[in-house]
Amino acid sequence: MNNNTFWVNGLDGSLSYWNGSFFEPFAFNEELKSLRPDQEGWLDFIGLHENTLFFQLIASDYWEITYPIYSINTCDGTTATHGEEILDFLNNTAPTDQIIKRRINIAKNLQAVKDSLKTLNVELRKISEVHFQWNAQSKIKNVKNITKEIIGLYIDENNNEWIATKAGVFYFKNGDLSAEPIIILEGIGVTVISKSKDGSLWVTSTDNGLFHIPNITIKKFKSKDWLDGETFYKLKKADNYLVVMSEKGRTFLLTKNQLNAQVDDNIIVDNLTNEKRKIISSSVHNYKGIFNMLQVENKTFLVYNSTGFNINTDKNYIPTLKYKFRTLSATIDRKKNIWIATTEGLFKWKNEYKKTEPALVPIQGIRDFRVNDVKMDNDGIWLATPKFGLVYKRDSLEYTFKHEKLSNKVLQAIYKQNDSTLWLGSNRGLLKAKYTFKNNIPIIEKMDVYTIKNGLISNYINDVSFWNDEIWLATDNGLCHFKPSQLSVSHTIPSLQIDFIETDKKQAVHTTQVTLPHNENDVTIHYTGISHNKPKKGFYRYKINDKPWVETNERKVSFLDLNHGEYAFKVQCRSDNSQWSNTKQLVFTIEPHFLERIWFKIAMICSVCIIIFLVIVRYKKNWQKKLENENRLRKSELTTLRNQMNPHFMFNSLTAIQGLIYKGEKLEANTYIGEFSRLMRKSLEYSKLENIVLEEEIQFIENYLELEKKRFKELFEYHIIIDPELSKSALQVPPLLIQPLLENCIKHGFRGMDKNKLIEISIQKHEHINDIFEVIIKDNGVGFDLSQLSNSSKSVGLGIVKDRISLIRENLNNKEVAFYIDSELGKGTTIRLLLPLNT
């Protein structure tokens, strides 16, 4: 239509049209129904003019037009019927749709078409497989049997004819039907061909989407000696020939005139004079080994093949290869070093070939990896590898390219066109890399990918070469060639829009910013991208907030059980050359539940704080009360223990006095009773105190020891040593703590000994712990077995002291306060008390 409206004809005869956003039913579909009296069949579209659409009731043969022809005005819905004359009118208005013009011409000249079909021995029912050309009088001038069903036609401004069929596009340059057509997108069902402003062709297909065909002609080289679709592995330029090797080991020579000769015992030469036959016949065998030989010096060659490589001085003789590695490619650098690409890794053979052995050169620390091709570049080399992709190596520099368009591709071959252009053959198309050096590091500035969508005969490129001013490709589907200047890709940025966001409550919102209630936290976002070069995988990529990009082919993405908060959803789509579109963004907010709102949280925090405060106050009161009770209990226990000391001491002392009286030593008994009474008075005073000064404790100990010496007639000696850093008048010690230990020394430690009895009492600051001092009581007595301590009489006094030390430790919460005892039979006993340094 003149307003470029896109119309769709339904099977029920109704029409719909694209209004720019979606399809809308035609306002006059009821009028269209009236054109079908029996309400059966459907109206078939055959032409248009301004605001009028022309139809016929469907016939058994698409190319036959039945009468009358119906028309309807899209503005007011008026209908009309027409006879055969309307075809002349439609033909003279030169409709842009060539398939409509073809149909009108066939309908107008059906008899002439039938006669032409008979000439070609084609049945009438195969009329859709035959292409007709018409003169100015709409008469048939040329006929071509395509043998494929024709679905669409396009004739460009240069009269080149593009025929869309169910098996690809048939291209006739200048409309010359006498020449064999070039087939593009072979095997793909093509429906419509259209041309864009840049001269590119856009092709729609039945099952493979939309294709872009640049304004070029990629030629497939054919020869009667070659099998259709034969795989070619290697290309080499030599003299005026391009040498080609096939999968079957056959070698061919291509001349500048694209004549060829097969290099084997049965030489095949096309259209050559006898003289040229002799020249080729004598020389072709010289090219048979071109794929497994590299000249490194005047009479020195690197010979290699699928079983190994070696240095040879005779290029016509291939010896048993010494180094057993499957060799794929080789090159020599400016320093005459040989670089050899094998399936087991990259070898370097230094220029002194007879004196050195080839050595494996690791890439990224790996030695065992396949290298498919190696090419020189000034002082460096380029490597084509399956594992690392494209690698550049020079001296100690090793650079692996991480370009997006190199990912998921196995590089097969490298051709260096000049100092800034590389052509890379891969298993997924041909790559053209424009590069430059910055700080001696190669930087890829631009990379394009060409595939069958751009007219290549295959995506599997085994080798690349430049010959006869053209790029030549060896593929698994034969040879093709083209001029580099003709090859181009579309850099059209795809269009993209976010359609809507849908929640689990089926609420669809068309906007870029959405607020959702807390219970609608399962969301699905729909989006649509349009690209004329859509990739097979990863057409879209999306991310939410700061998460990484995720690639997908789906037109929607779901996020389930989202927490409340703000989310920024971003999406892009890309063309086949990996150019991403502008980012579209949708911001949506999921409101929190009232339990998660700030005011509720503040109220809850305040409530919790009040409860915690009350609990702490109550707990503190209970804790203080508990501490007071525990302190009273501990004091009571200490007092009890101290009081236990008095009767124990009194019993032993009275026993001594009794012994003196019994012996008749009245004067000594009287003196002993006087000193004993003073000691008892001190004992009674100290038993009421928690701590006394060190000086008082020492006096008490000395009084006790003097009494015991009198009791035992001075059969032992004692020494008391006090650290000068300790103040005897200030240091606080628990009373009556040392006396029971001294009593054990005298009563049990010296049992059975007659002389040299010694007790040493040392009071000093702890060597490592600042707030602790220690009392060390050491005797040279008989000692005892510590394992029998609990069963002996010694345990009564020692047990009381240990219990007091334990209570002091708990009361002061000081883990360093301790009691230690060490004894060995025949070597005496040592007791250590670790006490708090209180002043």
Image (cartoon, rainbow, N blue to C red):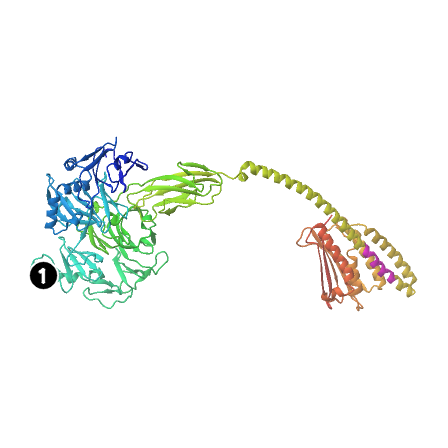
Of 162 and 92, the residue lying toward us: 92
Is 158 left, or right, of 529 in this rendering? Answer: left
Residue numbers of the magenta segment = 643-656
Is 620 left, or right, of 375 in this rendering? Answer: right
Element carrying mark 1? helix
- Residue 561 image offset from top left, x and y in percent: 47, 45
Of 99 and 704, the residue lying toward us: 99
> Which residue appears farthest toward the front when viewing the image?
38
> Which residue appears farthest toward the top when viewing the image?
76
Of 328 and 411, the residue lying toward us: 411
- Residue 549 image offset from top left, x and y in percent: 39, 45
Instruction: Establish if 162 lies above or below 349.
Output: above
How many marks can you see?
Answer: 1
Whether residue 469 is visible: no
Whether residue 744 is visible: yes
Magenta stretch holds residue 411: no
Classify mark 1: residues with Cα within 10 Å, few (<14), some (14-19) or many (20+).
Answer: few
Magenta stretch holds residue 645: yes
What residue would you read off at disc 1? 278
**Could you tell me what secondary structure mostly forms the magenta stretch?**
helix
- Residue 763 image offset from top left, x and y in percent: 73, 55
Under mark 1, the amino acid is: Lys
Q: Quadrant of residue 678?
A: bottom right
Q: Quadrant of residue 511?
A: top left
- Residue 807 image offset from top left, x and y in percent: 73, 53
Instruction: Establish if 563 lies above or below 699.
Output: above
Q: Quadrant of the N terminus?
A: top left
Of 114 and 695, the residue lying toward us: 114
